[in-house]
Image (spheres, rainbow, N blue to C red):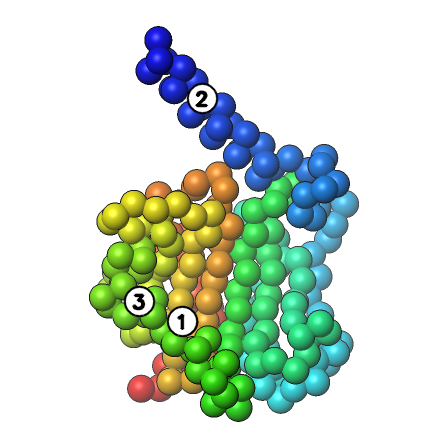
Amino acid sequence: MKKLFLIVLLFVSKLLMAQAAIDCNDPNLLSCCPSLASYTPKMKLYEDLGCKTDRKAAEYPFFPKMLEYQGYIFRDISSCAAQNMDCSLMFDYCVPQTRETMRVKITDYKDPFFATNQGKAALNMDFLVLNPQALALGSHELSPMNRKYKKSRIVSARFSPYGGKSDDVMYYAFVNDRYMITITLTDKMNRFKSALETEGFLNSYIEQINLKETY
């Protein structure tokens, strides 16, 4: 009887988590992705964004200009107004009528910020997951057929051999000793069960990133 109760409790918990990811009726939760019936994805030209840094101007052409990817629709280009002085640019996507998101971020590590103590600390944290010894953190090397960039990993605590939980699944790539590419998928529905499955899902997008590895 106790075992049956635990099974039912686990099922209900998973159901509630799934509802949290797709329920768009609660105004107290994170903003919900609109339906395509009420929203037409549009992407602004760089000169219309209001960004004021040369580094962001250099990063903009790297991003694939996709309005839809594997069920995710383009939502916004972040970090121009609120964080206009930083060295990152972010493209946001979401699954219609859910709170599932995909954020693509490119950061320029040649920015003077990373010469400061605070910047060095942030840099060290990012590089930790790229270490081949970081398997305990759920960091996995991409398979050769999907490895566009030499220094790239799929990372999530859920992929740790020691067990772990996380709503996020991430792709990291450090290119030309300068640019860090991160793709973060929120995955409350637990769609991605392995690093290999995740890289397969992201591969077509990564292939279209317009940043060539030169060495």
Could you say where residue 63 lies in the image, as x and y percent from the top left? 54, 72
Q: Tell me the residue that label 3 is attached to.
A: 147
Could you say where residue 173 lies in the image, as x and y percent from the top left? 39, 71
Closer to the camera in the image, 3 or 180:
3
How many residues crowd around disc 1 within 10 Å: few (fewer than 14), some, or many (20 or more)?
Answer: few
Could you say where residue 127 lies in the image, as x and y percent from the top left? 36, 74
How many residues crowd around disc 2 within 10 Å: few (fewer than 14), some, or many (20 or more)?
Answer: few
Q: Tell me the residue that label 2 is attached to.
A: 9
Q: Tell me the residue at 71%/61% (across/down).
A: 42
Q: Which mark is residue 125?
A: 1
Q: Are marks 1 and 2 in contact (CB under 8 Å)?
A: no
Q: Are marks 3 and 2 in contact (CB under 8 Å)?
A: no
Element marked by disc 2: helix
Which is more N-terminal, label 1 or label 3? Answer: 1
Closer to the camera in the image, 75 or 124:
124
Q: Tell me the residue at 53%/86% (across/down).
A: 113
42 lies left or right of 109: right
Q: Is residue 161 visible?
A: yes
Which is more N-terminal, label 2 or label 1? Answer: 2
Element marked by disc 3: loop
Q: Quote the CA–CA distance across marks 1 and 2.
A: 37 Å
Picture quarter with the C terminus: bottom left
Q: Tell me the residue at 71%/37% (across/down).
A: 26
Q: Which of the two marks, 3 or 2, is nearer to us in this view? A: 2
Q: Which of the two marks, 3 or 1, is nearer to us in this view? A: 1
Q: Quote the CA–CA distance across marks 3 and 1.
A: 22 Å
Q: Quote the CA–CA distance across marks 3 and 2.
A: 41 Å
Picture quarter with the N terminus: top left
Q: Residue furthest top?
A: 1
Q: Quadrant of residue 53?
A: bottom right
Which amino acid is tagged 3? Arg
